[in-house]
Image (cartoon, rainbow, N blue to C red):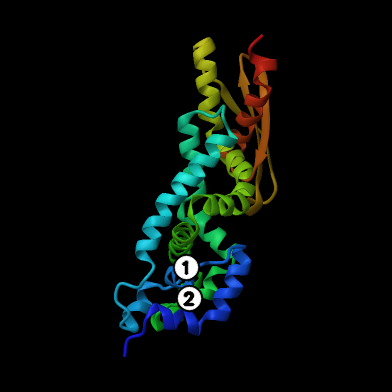
Amino acid sequence: MGMDLDSLARKNKEELSSFEQILGYRFTDLRLLQKALVHASFAFENSFPGHNNETLEFLGDAVLDLVVGHTLYQRFPAMREGELTKLRSALVNETHLATMARDVELGKFLCLGKGEDASNGRNKSSILACAYEAVVGAVFEDGGYETVQDLVLRFFVPAFEAKREELLIADAKSRLQEVLQEQYNEAPSYRVDMEEGPSHQKVFTVSVIFREIVLGTGAASSKKEAEQRAAAIALVEHDRLISR
């Protein structure tokens, strides 16, 4: 015996309502929220054809690209296109979306098939990220652009600076090299100043040097990360040290 979205949404009314409270948005059509939470494994087991969250996920994916892109464009007017693209990818990739899904406890509201549920499906990053996109698609379909923008401002904007910081550090070595090659046609070098701690908890201190001047020093648990941190510091100090 198959069921329909209406009866499923009625059956889960209390859970859906507490999820609405976490999201800070009340749906006009609760079936949309219910559909966003139906995984394909559940739809298959309950002869519920075409009522899983995959098309809403498709919609949510496009909506997030637009809304996150639009918000970044407004927040960081001086950022170059390539950097905006990287930052948006860091915010809407599977890992970050799964983190966002865990923040709103999305896993416990999912309708999963028995096998998927038994194999810890409620905590799988791929399932959580897709369902999060589906929820965004449902909010867009139910409430339009401004509503989704409001959601993105509340949930995504707090992560903007942290992700930007991570990307700047990860990108710092190549950016420092570009700057110095452009101005002086020379590349910087990196020197390990110190290795401390036992082998499983080593801390490396690395300096980046250019024409015998130390431009920056960073410490981290791997040489590569310490070099990136040193380069990030050099870029911040760059105007003072290497443009004179």
**Few, some or many C-alpha atoms within 10 Å of disc 1 (few <14, some 14-19, many ≥20)?**
few
Res. 76 image quadrant: top right
Q: Which residue is mark 1?
A: 124
Q: Is residue 109 above or below residue 56?
A: below
Residue 15 position within the rendered picture, expressed as x and y whole percent measured from the top left: 56, 78
Q: Going 62% across and 66% down the picture, which residue do you hit?
A: 22
Amino acid beneath label 2:
Asn
The quadrant of the picture occupied by the C terminus is top right
Q: Going 57% across and 27% down the picture, which residue do you hit?
A: 78
Instruction: Say whether marks 1 and 2 touch (CB < 8 Å).
Output: yes
Q: Is residue 128 above or below residue 67?
A: below
Element type at mark 2: loop
Q: Going 49% across and 82% down the picture, which residue do you hit?
A: 10
**Few, some or many C-alpha atoms within 10 Å of disc 2 (few <14, some 14-19, many ≥20)?**
few
- Of residues 228 and 195, the one nearer the viewer is 228
Residue 232 position within the rendered picture, expressed as x and y whole percent measured from the top left: 62, 31
Q: Which residue is mark 2?
A: 120
Left or right for 113, reference 194: left
Q: Going 57% across and 54% down the picture, which residue do you hit?
A: 151
Toward the bottom, the furthest residue is: 1
Element type at mark 1: loop
Q: Is residue 144 above or below residue 41?
A: above
